[in-house]
Image: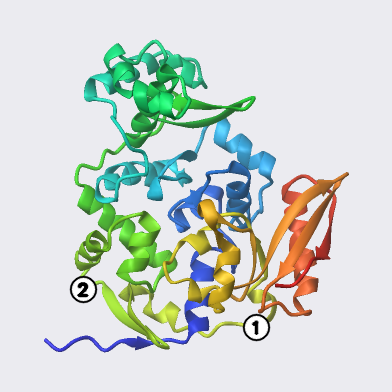
């Protein structure tokens, strides 16, 4: 059978498709859960940027306070837990949590090394969760971790200047979260708190996914619907997996995919069902709004190929920085034209902007409007913007 002829697309067609599917253009998702589903989770190592990312993708633009309340009071639809790349994300609990748990076995191991808790250690941790107050701190498991496991991790804990019992309890919590038994609840002071799934989501029908490969393939379909067209390397990058495994998930979708050529890029694949929407011509003006993307925004985590969003390779290090830090960025028509920081000043939001090569004076009016929306999200009355030095 002859190879399928690639669909030819312009770069702006691809960027416009991703903007609409990620709800950074158009009417926005009907609710926060739909916004989280559309992006296959919102990275939430820090909660505040994640809440802004969800708000920007939701039609009603809910405030940070409203979203924080939705995370912590029932009935809950959002869950904060470890997801792809072994990083905290906010997911739609009903649709995505079990899928993420099942697919984890297909991803590369996380960065944590050393002795992991045994099944007996995890069983002891689960027993401690029964009847636990909601939410609870790591201290709940201090009496539950077995002496044998504390001894096994003592040397590693002491090398990190950590108490062995606290270190062991943290490992048990982390593994139970990987199994879907608990999630992040919030904080008490500076300490993170947790909640058992059955207590925090009493009405959630937990659908355990038995086949990790099938779960990963289903997530691949979801990824392409939001971030396509993409390569196997992009897919592996997004989920924190090996390219070989990503290629297998794509192979499982044979018959649903169409090859895409965009400029000099090769190896791109998209869902055949999305072909007509991919061919759509991008609009002008306010139909594709400028956005103040938060730290670690999903748009910037979706592809190994950074040239989609930052055409000047020399500027990539200004966005994707050391220590897995991804800067808050100004997006215009799918490309990053500046970075930004902010701080509250009395009742106003002060945005400091550092232009990149794509910045133009015409961006300022739209940026001020968007800054006011961010201020409202944070419960502030207004916003002011200051340009700092240019790179």
In depth, the one of 223 and 110 nearer the eye is 110
Q: In the structure shown, which secondary structural element does the residue marked by tag 2 occupy?
A: loop
User: How many marks are shown on the rendered structure?
Assistant: 2
Residue 202 visible in this rendered orientation of the protein: no
Percent position of residue 252, x then y: 19, 64
Vertical side of 115 occupied by 344: above or below: below
The structure residue drawn at horizontal position 66% and vertical position 71%, both measured from the top left corner, is 289
Left or right of residue 371, residue 207 in this image: left
Of all residues, the one furthest to the right in this rendering is: 346
Vertical side of 188 occupied by 312: above or below: below
Residue under pointer 2: 255
Residue under pointer 1: 284
The structure residue drawn at horizontal position 45% and vertical position 15%, both measured from the top left corner, is 140
User: Mark 1 or mark 2, which has the lower sequence index?
Assistant: 2
Q: Where, by quadrant of the figure, is residue 151 drawn?
A: top left
* Residue 320, numbered label: none
Vertical side of 204 occupied by 120: above or below: above
Crowding at dot 1, Cα within 10 Å, few <14 / some 14-19 / many 20+, comes out as few
């Amino acid at each position: 059978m002859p190879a399928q002829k690639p669909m030819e697309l312009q770069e702006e067609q691809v960027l416009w498709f991703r903007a609409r599917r990620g709800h950074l253009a158009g009417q926005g998702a009907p609710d926060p859960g739909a916004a989280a589903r559309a992006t296959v989770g919102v990275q939430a190592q820090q909660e505040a940027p994640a809440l802004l990312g969800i708000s920007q993708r939701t039609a009603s633009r809910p405030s940070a306070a409203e979203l924080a309340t939705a995370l912590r009071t029932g009935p809950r639809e959002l869950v904060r837990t470890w997801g792809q790349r072994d990083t905290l994300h906010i997911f739609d609990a009903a649709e995505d949590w079990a899928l993420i748990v099942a697919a984890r076995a297909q991803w590369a191991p996380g960065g944590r090394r050393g002795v992991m808790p045994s099944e007996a250690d995890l069983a002891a941790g689960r027993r401690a969760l029964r009847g636990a107050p909601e939410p609870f701190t790591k201290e709940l498991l201090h009496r539950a971790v077995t002496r044998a496991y504390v001894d096994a991790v003592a040397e590693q804990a002491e090398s990190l200047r950590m108490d062995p019992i606290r270190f062991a309890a943290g490992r048990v919590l982390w593994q139970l979260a990987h199994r879907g038994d608990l999630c992040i609840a919030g904080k008490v002071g500076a300490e993170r708190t947790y909640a058992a799934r059955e207590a925090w989501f009493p009405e959630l029908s937990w659908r355990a996914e038995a086949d990790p490969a099938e779960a990963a393939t289903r997530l691949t379909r979801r990824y392409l619907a939001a971030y396509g067209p993409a390569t196997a390397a992009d897919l592996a990058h997004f989920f924190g997996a090996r390219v070989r495994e990503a290629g297998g998930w794509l192979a499982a979708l044979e018959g649903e995919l169409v090859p895409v050529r965009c400029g000099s890029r090769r190896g791109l694949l998209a869902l055949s069902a999305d072909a007509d929407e991919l061919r759509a011509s991008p609009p002008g003006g306010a139909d594709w709004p400028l956005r103040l993307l938060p730290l670690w925004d999903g748009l910037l985590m979706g592809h190994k190929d950074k040239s989609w969003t930052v055409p000047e390779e020399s500027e990539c290090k200004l966005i994707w920085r050391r220590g897995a830090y991804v800067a808050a960025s100004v997006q215009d028509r799918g490309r990053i034209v500046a970075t930004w920081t902010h701080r509250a000043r009395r009742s106003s939001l002060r945005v400091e902007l550092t232009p990149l090569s794509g910045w133009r004076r015409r961006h300022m009016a739209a940026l001020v409007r968007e800054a006011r929306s961010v201020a409202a999200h944070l419960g502030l009355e207004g916003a002011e913007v200051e340009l700092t030095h240019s790179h």
